[in-house]
Image (tube, rainbow, N blue to C red):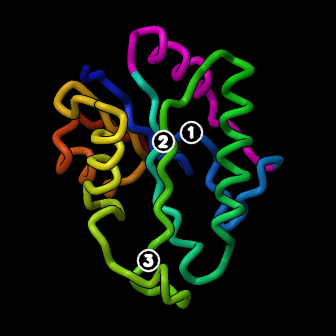
């Protein structure tokens, strides 16, 4: 069974972008985010986070920090009955210093690989789905994956 989804960038779209700070206690939801996610969930959309996290590659933070942040986000959203079906963070960056993460791959936005992987694993119909983000890389990834896209400019 195929489902419709909303793919969501994390930093600058759902939460304030605090570069290289992945501590759950520093999560600051952007205004209207929780209510918007609740409305999307009630409208039948599966919610999936897709986020580049290239700070792992140059050792600015660790993969374990991303896992703690994910658990914090999920716990916060659960308080509002907003489930995340998927959470996909990509730690690769072609200019990284950690050899296992120093790669250029099709999963790093603006490439669509992360969305395609999530869609395959979670049985999502990309043509009936959306990508929401705050930069043109998010739009490009969504379009390349076959989604409709929305971006916003913060004042």
The numbered mark, 3 or 1, whose residue comes first in the sequence reads 1
Answer above or below: position of 51 versus 33. below
Residue 65: x and y in percent read: 71, 61
The numbered mark, 2 or 3, whose residue comes first in the sequence reads 2
Callout 1: SS: loop
In 3D space, how far apart are the residues under numbered discs 2 and 1 (Cα atoms)?
9 Å
Identify which residue is drawn at 69% across, 23% down.
78
Answer above or below: position of 11 versus 122. below
- Taking the image as shown, residue 65 lies to the left or right of residue 7, namely right
Q: Which residue is mark 2?
A: 49
State the image quarter where residue 74 is shown: top right
The mark found on residue 59 in the picture is: none
- Callout 3 crowding tier (Cα within 10 Å): few <14, some 14–19, many ≥20: many
Identify which residue is drawn at 58% across, 72% down.
55
The numbered mark, 2 or 1, whose residue comes first in the sequence reads 1
Answer above or below: position of 5 versus 154. above
In 3D space, how far apart are the residues under numbered discs 3 and 1 (Cα atoms)?
22 Å
Identify which residue is drawn at 56% across, 51% down.
11
What range of the chain is rendered magenta?
Answer: 26-45
Residue 145: x and y in percent read: 20, 46
Answer above or below: position of 142 versus 61. above
Q: Quarter of the image containing the N terminus?
A: top left
- Taking the image as shown, residue 134 lies to the left or right of residue 18, namely left
Q: Please name whichever residue, 26 or 73, is drawn nearer the observer in this view of the structure.
A: 73
Q: Which residue is mark 1?
A: 14
- Callout 1 crowding tier (Cα within 10 Å): few <14, some 14–19, many ≥20: many
Callout 3: SS: loop
Residue lying at the far right of the rendered structure? 25
State the image quarter where residue 149 is shown: top left
User: Magenta stretch containing residue 137, yes or no?
Assistant: no
């Amino acid at each position: 069974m195929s489902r419709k989804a909303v793919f969501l960038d994390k930093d600058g779209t759902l939460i304030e972008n605090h570069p290289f700070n992945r501590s759950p206690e520093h999560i600051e939801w952007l205004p209207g985010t929780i209510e918007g996610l609740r409305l999307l969930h009630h409208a039948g959309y599966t919610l999936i986070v897709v986020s580049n996290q290239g700070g792992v590659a140059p050792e600015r933070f660790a993969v374990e920090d991303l896992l703690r942040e994910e658990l914090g986000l999920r716990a916060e959203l659960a308080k509002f009955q907003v489930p995340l079906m998927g959470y996909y963070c990509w730690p690769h960056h072609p200019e990284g210093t950690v050899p296992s993460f120093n790669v250029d791959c099709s999963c790093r936005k603006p490439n669509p690989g992360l969305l395609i992987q999530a869609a395959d694993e979670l049985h999502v119909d990309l043509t009936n789905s959306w990508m929401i983000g705050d930069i043109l890389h998010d739009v490009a990834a969504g379009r390349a994956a076959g989604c409709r896209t929305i971006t916003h400019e913060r004042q």
